[in-house]
Amino acid sequence: MKEQKRFNVIPAVFIIFLLAFVATYLLLSNTMRSMDEASEREALSLLSENAVQMERIFENQLSNNWKHIGMVSRALNHMQDSTNEEIVNYLQVAMPDTYNILLLSDDGIYIDKSGKQGMMEITKDLLPLAQGEEHLLFLSQKGNMDMLTFGTVIDPITIDGIRMNYLFVYYSLDEYMDLLKMESFEGKGKIRIINGKGATLLHTDNVARSENRYLFFSGAKDAEFMNHPIVKDCDSFKEYVLSGKTDAIRMVLATGADVIVSFTKIPDTDWFIIVSIEHDVVVGTRTTNLRQIGKMSLMSVMVIVVISLSLVFLILSLSQKKTKAKNRELEQLNLQLQHANRAKSIFLSNMSHDIRTPMNAVIGFTTLAAENVENTQLVRDYLTKILSASKHLLSLINDILDMSRIESGKLRLEETETNLSDIITNIKAILSGKIKEKQLKFYVNVVNVTNTEVHCDKTRLNQILLNLLSNSVKFTPEGGSITLTLTQKKSSEELGEYEIRVKDTGIGMSQEFAEHIFETFERERSSTVSGIQGTGLGMPICKNLVELMGGTILVDTEKDKGTEVVVSLPLSIVKGSKKGSNEDLFSVGNIKGAFKGKRVLLVEDDEMNMEIASEIFGSYGFEIDRAENGKEALDKITCANVRYDLICMDIHMPVMDGYEAVRHIRNMDNPELSQLPIIIMTANAYDEDRQMAKACGVNGFITKPFDTKEIINALKNVFNKNIMT
Amino acid sequence: MHNKKRKSLILTGFLILSLLSGCKEPDASHQAENQTDSTEDKIQIKVQYEAGRMNMSLESVLEEKFPDVDIVTDELVGEPEYIIEKEMENNLEPDIYLYEDLWKMDDNLMSERFYDLSREDFTDNYYLSAISDCVRSDGGLYYLPGPIYIYGIVYDKTAFRELNLSIPKSYSEFVTLIQTVNDMDIMGQEPDENNPEQLVDVKVAPFVPTMKWPDMWSIVFNTYNYEDYLRGTANTMWLTDYQEGKESMVGHMEGAADDFLQLFKDGIISTDFWEVGAPVRTQKLYQYHTSLMTIECQSAIGYNMAENENNMNNIHEIGMMPFYTSDEKDSDYVYTMPRCYFGMTKKATADDKKKEAILKIFEFFSTAQGQELLIEGGGGELNLLKDTDTPDDPFYDEIRDTVDEGRTISNFYYAGKNEDVEAYLHAATPDLVKGNISVEQWLKEADNVRDKVIHHTNDEEVSYGTVTRTMTMEETAVIIGEAYIHATGADIGIVPCTASFGMKFRLFEGPITDTVINSIATTRMGAGAIVGDSGHTQLVVVSVTGQELLDLLNSYGDTFVATAGLDVEYAPDRPEGERYVSLKLHGKDLDPSATYTAAVVRGAAKDLPVEKVYEELTFNDMFIRYVDSIGGTISEPPKSLSIVK
């Protein structure tokens, strides 16, 4: 009987093992298949998005170029009475980044931006312009390089008795393609721009290695098109792409290469962007990993069953759990990667929009201003709008640069004695306009603050507060409230624990988004949707700055209820500090004419900057004297007849730069000259530049574009000291 | 001007003429088909190039640069398109084609028989726009462009200095210059037309271009009429419409025709130039200095250098000036033509080593140095490579501004890819000048020719007979020799299997048309003409002893020389000089001391005494008469050649 019982157990064990094996196999296969399909879908979607991204970058560049060319051609229209020299000078100044610009007559005679006249063969390719086309984009060769050439019809302008009808602008093709290379899957994606016949016009370097690189669709001949509802063969593929669709298709080429090809049309052209990438590069590695895990799991099952039936179920169960955990882990990793990539794409897309929007305003209003130059009121209105757009653009650029510097570890804090109360007052003043505009209630609470004088980087603390409060202003609907609370927590004599809370009754955030708010490139809704502009870099910058200061930042938020951001900062307390700040000797309101009788020497090589600086300093009452470089400045300073009260010096200038000129001045024997107050005015706004200027012995540092408040502060510092002495 | 030893002059003259005519003996490319390769350890690469368009040092430079390869050159002569087509049909194509009209060839032929270069890295060296022009409808890149030839007026700088002549700066100054030189009555010396060994006094001509070919006509006609009739948007629209058959010469080009005729009236060109072949023009300017100017491209540098090397006692410097088309500012132009494209046949790719070697050669061709090797004469060039500078040779001094400021005219054809309109206008120009036809007739007929081209209604070629089977090169040479005997009544017809005063291409099964006859023509000067070009391509009868004949045949080295009329035993495997085993006339061995008559092209007869010259006989007429005499059918060549071990 015992033997019989044992005999019956073996087949049962075998059957159970078999069933368990089959079940595990089916389960894993099914899971892997589902994940494969999901990966495939995700990859295609990602690729499709990538093509759109490429197109946007390219289109954006084209569009900017065309707009610029349009502006130039309109401006030329107003230069009918100008001399040849003036026109050539204008061409040089108007488009300095182009390889060349030329005005062309119907007879093929041209004048270019160097003033050189010559002849250009009117080939068949150029005829569309003469036959009514407004724009023409084509490849050409100039100066040993491939060129992307923009041609447009202009209102005729006469030069040397020749009627010039066309404007041609040459851009380096390499520079254009570099734009696309950045986003081609770390260089693994092959990017082409093809025309309506399928012939390749431009391509990235890596396309050069493949056959038929010049006629894209030939490469797809005899390809097997995978799971696409419309595209079944090369002909339908060609038709589908050239119909202007945006999509991504997986195909196995006759050569055996398994690729995903994404494509989209460039609006207003007969050109298409095609991005192709090997399937494995996008989805292959992960799929392979999953399969290996599956195989390992199956082997585990078999080994375990052989050892002990009793452990089969347990181990199977464990194995499944492990597999699931690993899969979850991989899924998680995958999701994170996808999320990061998507966030980056969305960021680029948003940036494209966000930069274009103010640029459009600048270009558009400049054009309008040029067209209505006689209408002063209108021009003033346009200029106000241009100024506003420019400021916004500048803040975007600053954010991006800040983030880049933070990430590269270049950002250093510059701690000075700072009054927290002044900072809050200042911020309140900055935001008061917008707060009033949105009819918000703004409360400031100061709790237990016994030491307002602290050591910290004033600029960066300002930046943090401005960012947090600007967010609150942006995302709090009309009539809502914002509360800023500054609390001094436990403190020693030297160190104070400060807490800054910014709380609003705004639209809040989803928990899901709040988790990512400090990640670079995040923004809950794009500005194109919400109408609210921003880089999505504000919060990451805040977090990084706070952490750089040794503090922490937390967010508490609820959708449609509001958000509270809590910043904790350890700040060293200024010994023997007392509350309060100096009264402004020169407030913005009464600055006009305040420096009457004083003479300033403006040293600046850029005509436009010189004009602006002259206007500003002139309005403060300064008598203006000008020098175009350091050498000329030294000559003027040492001239016995003139004495200056202030020198404002640019850094980058021909002949002698600003630093060298400052060193010369500081080394002069005559103390009256060597101690002349010098303010550096420069577009180099980094701390290194400030340090360098300081080392040279300057008294102040202002950045371009000019900010009147910054100028006033610099003047205040310089003349306060002088008055005191 | 000429204080040289006469003998040296004659020798130099012959050498340069030989060089220009592609007379490069012994030429391995024309060895008999059953001969074996003497350099078996090397990779043999057969390069076929268009006659007269190739740098003669191509072979030596490539072999020096690529020691593993043995370059075998072969000329495309007469009817290149027909020859290439037949070569492809019969699997006779070379490994590399260097040919001006590769771009005209059929898409299907290209994709079937040429290697696609698009995957090769060196194609990145070219401007993308230049590459785009070469890409075929299937996306294949079957050939790459060689250098751009610039045509201008090449002048003798040294002579200008000696004669105190200034370089003109306008059309009027150019006319005055020609009159001035004519009035100066400068005398020089050059070989007598009828007796090349004899130097005779001649008046130095101011300007001797060749107008023998339609392309030269295009350069002159299009350049001088460019500003008023071809430049700018309106004229380009007219030309585009004309090429599509929507416009007429009549109503647009009358002024151009009048201005063209003015060139004759002003003494700039003359109908005499229609008879001037390239060698005559070249020897006058570079060798004997009996003309001061011609129309030429950068190749002039190479020609002049060769002459200077041959005559170190009388070095002449040359330069190129633009065409001055009017007295207006910026009316100076140069004309440009792409003259060479290079491609590899798929046949060559069957051997991996050969393919690799050719790709290395192509990589070299895709550099500035390599492009220079692709130009006839080896002068500096402008090319379509990125990141290369224009040459700074003093030769270009006078045209530098012209090129730099874009006053270059690109070659085009009035009927698209076809040169028939130019061919007609060129051929009919002498009649126009003489008043035999009116301007309107001239232009109307051009329209008719254009219509025929675009509507594919060109007349079918006349067939003079039939070839019943494809002949070998040696058999074809023997048939041509038979035609010589038929035309002259000589005992023997001598035809070297080389393009230099011999024959070029084999007869293929099919009708015998002018195209077919042109393709086998005795000389590479084309059009089937034996006459012209200083008499070197004329058919002559020479008297020759049996020994002299054997010496002549052996002097051709490994090149087979057909001797129609004789029974020949030929041993291709034996050393050079021992391959002609026996020569029999009417069954008897030739007597070494007996004298026989032989018909041969003068250039191939070397020093044999000429008995009779057939000045007016063209190759085509001669061959057609021969075909007619044998009843119109060439089935088998006379059984006169036996191959022996």
Image (cartoon, coloured by chain):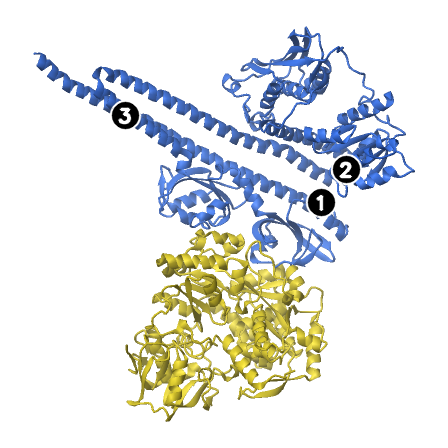
Q: Residue furthest right?
A: A641
Q: Secondary structure at mark 2?
A: helix
Report crowding for label 1: few under 14, some 14 to 19, many 20 or more residues within 10 A (C-alpha): few
Q: Along the polypeptide, which appears first: circle 2 or circle 3?
A: 3
- The reply to whether label 2 and label 1 mark residues of one chain is yes
Judge depth for marks 2 and 1 and give the one in front: 2
Chain at numbered mark 1: A
Residue B358 versus residue B258 in the image, above or below: above
Indicate which disc, 1 or 3, sits on the residue closer to the N terminus.
Answer: 1
- Give the chain coloured blue: A
User: Dot 2, how many residues are within 10 Å of its Cα: few (below 14), some (14-19), or many (20+)?
Assistant: some
Q: Drawn colour of chain B?
A: yellow
For disc 3, the marked residue is: A298
Q: Nearer the viewer, residue A496 or A137?
A: A496
B78 to B125, vertically: above or below = below
Q: Secondary structure at mark 3?
A: helix
- Mark 2 vs 1, N-terminal side: 1
CB under 8 Å between callouts 2 and 1?
A: no
Mark sitting on residue A660 = 2
The residue under label 1 is A93
In the rendered image of this protein, does residue B101 appear above or below residue A248?
below
Q: Secondary structure at mark 1?
A: helix
| B428 to the left or right of B496 | right
Label 2 marks a residue whose chain is A
